[in-house]
Structure formats: structure tokens, C-alpha cells
Image (cartoon, grey):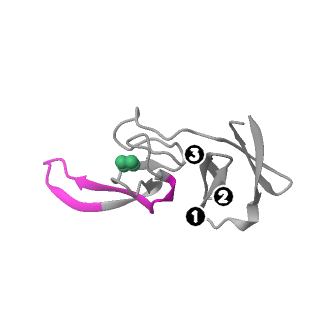
Amino acid sequence: MKDVNVGAASSFTDPGRKVFDCGGTEVGVFLLDGEFYAWENRCPHLDGPACQGKIVPLFTEAVNEDLTSRGREFSKTQTNVVCPWHGFEFDIRTGVHPTDARVRLKGVKLRVEDGDVWLSVRA
Ligand code: FES
């Protein structure tokens, strides 16, 4: 493993994301509600650039007890990134697909040290 400095923490917008080429491994670094998350930019579906898609709240349909719809709702607690190739979504905080926990992004170790963001990637 090698450590890669990807810049000042203050250079990230919140919410926001940057994608870095770390010597052959592309990594998406997200800042969300003051916390950083890092995922390999490789979709588990067909290797698309999952970290480069739109950042959106989880979108669900609200259903009454009698199974009638109350319409669509945006989550106030879960934010996803949408793979631009075929639309698979992943929770930015966990890297997990909303309906199948077996489908997930691969995490990259991240730390903030002296105001800079560092990634640990395969050498
Ligand atoms: S490659 Fe990401 S959804 Fe297909």
C-alpha cells in the first residue's frame, strides 16, 4: 500500500466529490455532512465509473397501510451516487446498493491529517 495526498480538506465542497487517479486506481472521495468517504471508482455491475455519477437523495415511494401510494419521497438521511452507465445507486456513506447489500463499492482507507486528505491505495 502507498499513501497518496489528494489535497486540502478545505478544497472539497460539502456535499461534493472529487475523483483521483492514484497510480492506476481511480478513487472517488466524497464529503458529506462534514465526513469524508472514499470508494474505488469501479462499479460492481460492469466496472463503470460509479463515483462520477449524480449525487442524489435516496428516492422511494411512500405506501399507506392499504398499499395505496402517497407519492414519491426523497430521503432526508441517505444520499446516493448513481453510476452513470446503467443507474445502479450506492449509499455514499456505506457504498452499498439500496436493495441488495451484496452489491457494493470497494472502500479505500482515508484519513485527514494536518488539514490534508490522504488515501491508502494499492502500490
Ligand atoms: S456499470 Fe455501473 S450500473 Fe452498470
The residue carrying mark 2 is 34
Residue 15: mark in rendering: 1
Q: CA distance from mark 3 to mark 1?
A: 15 Å
Q: CA distance from mark 3 to mark 2?
A: 17 Å
- The amino acid on which the numbered mark 2 sits, given as a three-letter code, is Gly
Q: Earlier in the sequence, mark 2 or mark 1?
A: 1
The answer to whether marks 3 and 1 mark residues whose Cβ atoms lie closer than 8 Å is no
Which quadrant of the figure has residue 121?
top right
Give the extent of the magenta segment: 51-72
The answer to whether marks 2 and 1 mark residues whose Cβ atoms lie closer than 8 Å is no
Q: Quadrant of the N terminus?
A: top right
Q: Relative to 110, is 101 on the left or the right?
A: left
Q: CA distance from mark 2 to mark 1?
A: 8 Å
Dot 3: what SS? strand
Q: Quadrant of the C terminus?
A: top right
Q: Which residue lies at the image location 25% right of the left edge and 55% below the top edge?
A: 61
Dot 1: what SS? loop
The residue carrying mark 3 is 39
- Camera-nearest residue between 30 and 22: 22
Q: Position of residue 122 (x, y in %)?
A: 68, 36
Q: Which residue lies at the image location 34% right of the left edge and 40% below the top edge?
A: 99
Q: Relative to 42, is 26 on the left or the right?
A: right
Dot 2: what SS? loop
- The amino acid on which the numbered mark 1 sits, given as a three-letter code, is Pro
